[in-house]
Image: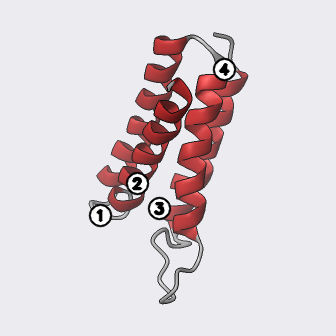
Amino acid sequence: MKTLLNLLFGALVGVSGTFLHNAYKPFGLLVSLIALFLGLRLVRNMYLSKLSLALFAIGWLFIIVRASTLGNGGEVLIEANAYGNILVFGGAALISWRLLARI
């Protein structure tokens, strides 16, 4: 149950970041990255395991990678502009920093 909950929570944070990062520039991007940081912190404090953080990260990364690729109609939800790049690479750096930190 914890596995599914962590995957789902990571996916929900990823969906909110996808739709918010480019909406209210630059505040949407800041809110997206802060939500990711707080989600990582919440999962770490709830379960005290790196596996929970990794599952959260997998859920987030799945949504972010899927939103960055071409869809059926040729749409891209995370564009390759400054805000999209900061969301993808900043989020990946934030996740790797939290995964490599001690619990």
Where does label 2 land, which residue?
Answer: 15
Please tell me whether residue 45 is drawn above or below residue 4 in the rendered image. above
**What's the amino acid at mark 4?**
Lys
Could you say which is closer to the camera, residue 73 or residue 83? 73
What residue do we see at 43% from left, 37% from top? 9
Locate residue 30, reporting x and y percent. 38, 45
Q: Secondary structure at mark 4?
A: helix
Check residue 23 in the rendering and tell me which mark sits there, or answer none: 1
Residue at the limit of the structure toward the front, as seen here: 1
Which tag, 4 or 1, sits closer to the chain's start? Answer: 1
Residues tagged 2 and 4 counted as in contact (Cβ below 8 A)? no
**What's the amino acid at mark 2?**
Val
What residue do we see at 46% from left, 41% from top? 8
Q: Secondary structure at mark 2?
A: helix
What residue do we see at 68% from left, 18% from top? 101
Which tag, 4 or 3, sits closer to the chain's start? Answer: 4
Which tag, 2 or 4, sits closer to the chain's start? Answer: 2
Check residue 8 in the rendering and tell me which mark sits there, or answer none: none
Q: CA distance from mark 3 to mark 2?
A: 15 Å
Q: Is residue 55 left or right of residue 74?
A: right
**What's the amino acid at mark 1?**
Ala
- Classify 10 Å Cα crowding around label 4: few (below 14), some (14-19), many (20 and above): some
Where does label 4 land, which residue?
Answer: 50
